[in-house]
Image (tube, coloured by chain):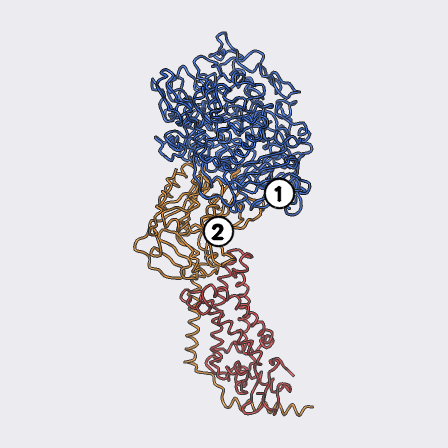
Amino acid sequence: MFPPLPNPSTAPGPARFGDKDLIRRSASTVTPPAQRQTEVAKLIDVSKCIGCKACQSACLEWNDQHEEVGVNTGVYDNPHDLTPASWTLMRFTEWVNPETQNLEWLIRKDGCMHCEDPGCLKACPAPGAIVQYSNGIVDFVKENCIGCGYCVKGCPFNIPRISRVDEKAYKCSLCSDRVAVGQGPACAKACPTQAIVFGTKEEMKKHADGRITDLKSRGYKNAGLYDPPGVGGTHVMYVLHHADKPEIYAGLPNNPKISPLVELWKGVAKYAGFAAIGALAVGSVLHRLVAGRSEVSREDETNAQRLAREEETKERASP
Amino acid sequence: MTNSWTDIKNTDLVVVMGGNAAEAHPCGFKWVTEAKANRGAKLIVVDPRFTRTASVADVYAPIRQGTDIAFLLGVINHCMQTDKVQWDYVRAFTNAAYVVKEGFAYQDGLFTGYDESRRDYNRSTWDYEIGPDGYAVVDETLQNPRCVWNLLKQHVATYTPEMVERICGTPKDKFVQIARMIAECASPTRTMTSMYALGWTQHSKGSQNIRAMAMLQLILGNIGVRGGGMNALRGHSNIQGLTDIGLMSNLIPGYLTIPTEREPSFDAYMATRGFKPLRPGQMSYWQNYRKFFVSFQKAMWGEAATADNAFAYDWLPKLDVPAYDVLRAFELMHQGKMNGYFCQGFNPLLSFPNRKKITTALSKLKFLVVMDPLQTETARFWENHGANNDVSPAAIQTEVIELPTTCFAEDEGSLVNSGRWLQWHWAGGTPPGEAKHDTWIMAQIHLRLKELYRKEGGPVPEPIVNLDWRYKDPNEPSPEELAKELNGYTTADLTDPNDPTKVVIAKGKQVPGFAVLRDDGSTACGCWIYSGSFTEAGNQMARRDTTDPDETGAYSKWAWSWPANRRILYNRASADRSGKPWDPSRKLLEWDGTKWTGYDVPDIAPTAKPEEVGPFIMNPEGVSRLFTRGMMRDGPFPVHYEPFESPVVNVVAPKVRGNPVARVFRNDMEQFGDAKEFPYAATSYRLTEHFHFWTKHAHANAVLQPEFFVEISEQLAKEKGIKPGGTVRVWSKRGSVTAKAVVTKRIRPLVCDGKTVHIVGIPLHWGFTGAARKGFGPNSLTPFVGDANIETPEYKAFLVDIEPVAGPVA
Amino acid sequence: MRRDEIVEGDALHPGDPVVIDRYSTAARFNHWMTAASLVLLALSGLALFHPALYFLTGLFGGGSNTRAIHPWIGLFLFLGYMGLFFRFWKVNLWTPTDGTWLKKLHVFLIGHEEDMPEVGRYNFAQKAVFWWMGILIMISIASGLVIWEQYFAAYTTVDQKRWAVLIHSVAAIVMICIVIVHVYGALWARGTMTAMIKGRVTGGWAWRHHRKWLRELAADPKANRGTATPAE
């Protein structure tokens, strides 16, 4: 058993991390702390998950969210997608392994991956609406969120959801409020089979190694850890039986990256745009200086008068 | 469970069959994942559906519902044929060598003594040959053709892999693969655990499903050892406690039995409960029956129960039928013979089969009292909810009285888990509104009844007016007082039998365990198996010490396990005949030359010599039974019987419909459908998102699984033109439901005896009250028939038809 | 009589100087509504485009309000532009002169307009502003709807939204550039501003910049009010 985190003291104490530990802040520059906190991570072992949805329930309860009672659409996924209230969701896939012809029911707990290089944060225009702590947690700060939905576009995993009630973005916080007092995330606490465990990123990688060895011994030769380098690694990782094909797990992206469109938008476009505007402004001033103004001369006025008269005369002449 | 949840981590092979542990017992299932992750244990799932348990299994095989016995006898056959038997265990600890009486035989699905008109057997030949010494005859060489081993070998020979495939629809290669994996556990150093639940019990031969696996486990030497056992996963958090304290019409606490009308006197009652040992030197622990019984009577009637009145034996009711089980109760109600009903913590309108019959029966009552923390469908059975409860309130005259009770989190007490652990819990909240503890309500009813009897007399008032009611607050006995009463106390000084002047335990003390109970009225004990749970040392159930020396998984200081804080039953069998552990790395007990030592409380007298006393002390044989004598109504060996509603004919006993001795009430026989009319094999089950009909009242659970659905294969969906997420009507001979359709690869048609059998899965969590969408339960469809021995309704196998219908569910 | 370059309401009033009604009150109102929308859109859009300009959200009552208001102003812009479009699309149609004019753009830029071909109500550059703004506004509206999270989030995929936001940004930048040129042009050519402020230009202005238009006006009996009192 992965040793569970001991219950913290009930006496109030200082939070284990806070604003001083920010390494990124949306639409702002921060001075990173001199010393980075130990990186934390949540490890979701898909091969141990029994799809009981206790994590979903714990997430709703801990975060005090009210999800709508939906309908059955012919699948076990309920709700049918992540929502502003449901920050995590079990996604069920029935997959027939072409090698063994055996059915495999792949059940993946979807939710924020807490990227080391978070696309949401990159895209966010509101200062401080998205922050990244030095322990790796990427958190949405509701007070600063303006509900523009740019985070949705920035995210390579399609995670953030905008509430139609308050027009704010929501996603898994990795229970930053619990981690701040030495607890693990609510989903990990509720998971009956330790398919979700929480600890330092190093511990999680080590734990994952043991799981991968076990899976390989059971014939899953492509078992592996999902910690995609395209986003600098993540602070939520998966153990997959088929790490070579993450996409079979309800579309888990193979080699996710912040979309080049977003990179373009938040990179070149931003600078090129200002450059263009600036160039034109400067160009106009220069033009004014060089070419002077275009003036209407007295001669022009006279010509106009003559023309008007001539034409009027022509007019009168013709019946 | 013979073992405990925590012990499952010690296993090498988990077989989940007749259950869906991951889904219905997700918290307990963690011990399976532990065994897998740390011991490299393998998990096998055999189920008609590819369940969430199957999703983490190493091997999954499909099976047609109701054919488990064929599968298991097939595995036993495989073990016997390939000599995968833990021989030392089988010879020493089972009745393999016992010789069976002449005259016992089996043919065409029936054993000797069948009487079709009574649907019952004369079981007199189902026993051992008794020798001149008065003991059972044994042939240690297993040469005698009539010894149990040879009879069993002959009995299971039919169940070849080919036959298993024909009956169960399990592909032969899958069956053989699984049989081989199981057979490996015949090694003394490999153990297998069987985890089962209502997938085995809810059949007309449920008890025999379990027997078949128990026999296999004995042949593999897996009973009494760490990581082995027969592990029933109980369906409610305290259903184990319910059976322990005898909340069955034929039981009194501690698995003692209610007298029948053929036992008018205490002596007549005890005459059949002597349990004389069948082999020399055996403990035959039920020889203490009288002590437990008298102590129970003293707990009930206190000083009014004396030796002179045979400890108030007359005040116990005497059964005129084998049992007043729920099916019989509703049958009587339906006949108009039962007209008042107290419904405490039960939701019969959704729980009992053939809902139409249940509704009719409830409608005939004069009054119905519902004690429940929730608004149950039963309490509202008279309300019209459109298609979901289509009744006419004006036509129902039943007076319904609802008494709101507290839920488990609002009171204190103990819950007994599947592993027999009595775990004390404390109230986490205060009762809402007018809700009252069940104990308060029961006390009020009792005190008022007592007063009425006192004032008005009436027939046989004694059992009520003399009932011992020694509680500080008679209006509400406290959980501690009740627990102490169950544990037992002395009603007089207990003296040393060898030295009557020496007082061993003074009067009025809590007894330390059932070993000190006496049959002379000097001890009172509400439930002998709970004796030791609340002693002079305090409430043992409230212990919260998680130490576990050498990480055996025993956790002996956490809570308290019946009997005697024993964590693994029959644990003496974990060591060989001489007392050495079969597997030194998994030692549980060991004979040190003078006594038994180890990690668990020995399930034998601590000084009982290993070569002399057998490990199965509750049996007069001292060994376990591959052949159960006449203990079960439907045979000493299990036989494959089809469900009463089956898509195919029984290939091993073509003339037998269902279980030949299962009780069927007259009108219910006509309500069985056949495969021509109802071609699809249906089964019912739970989903992990819900607990029965409770959690649909909880918003979060309603979100996670909001709406009633049925599951069918892609092939059946195609055949019937059913679209995923579309609406379907499913109907049986007894009723009809509408549901959403989940079309899935997880259910596949099976080929049984050349015929394609389609399976329809029907989960059970929806009704017309609560936060989830209104729906139906499978009991609108299921037949009114139960297991031949204990009357658990046959919910797991019945026939239906299905068609797509337009529109949303009403 | 050719009236290719004349818009309803254009009128020439002889005198000294000749006064020409170039933009009616309605047209001016339409223009300034459109212009104001553009400015507000640029401010609110830029506020969300670059963190350095986020302070501009203060003009709109904070980030959330800026996010909420921006698309509505966009709709306002759309309406405004549609008004201008239906008013002026005919006089912005391509004529062969525009090609000749463009070839001599350098001459125009150094201020030698007298060497340029005679143009109608609008020269090539003005027509380019007209059409480009039209195209870009349409692009912005379309892409803006895609990223209008509050109402239209459900109708497109995330990848479509990513394209939309990029296109929206680029379109906006180009529009801002065009507006800069447009405004500079108006300031550069003295006498132009009065067209959009008072609605009038002088005959000399028209002679210099839009002689073809002037000729048509003068020749048109309806537009040429003769010696009558100039409109006031």
Q: What percent of the width, then of the height, locates residue B638?
A: 56, 22
Q: Which residue is mark 1?
A: B739
Describe the element under mark 2 as helix, strand or loop.
loop
Is residue B495 shown above or below A166?
A: above
**Whether labels 2 and 1 share one chain:** no
Q: What percent of the width, then of the height, locates residue C231?
A: 58, 87
Query: The disc labelled 1 sits on which kind of residue?
Result: Ala
Judge the density around disc 2: few (<14), some (14-19), many (≥20) Cα neighbours within 10 Å.
some
Residue at image point 52% right, 57% down: A164
Query: The disc labelled 2 sits on which kind of residue?
Result: Gln
Q: Is residue B238 left or right of residue B574?
A: right
In the rendering, what colour is chain B? blue
In the rendering, what colour is chain A? orange
Q: Quadrant of residue B798?
A: top right
- B412, B457: nearer the viewer: B457
Q: Which chain is depicted red? A: C
- State how far apart marks 2 and 1 are (Cα): 28 Å
Q: Which mark is residue A65?
A: 2
Q: What percent of the width, then of the height, locates residue B43?
A: 47, 32
Q: Are marks 2 and 1 in contact (CB under 8 Å)?
A: no
Q: Is residue B165 visible?
A: no
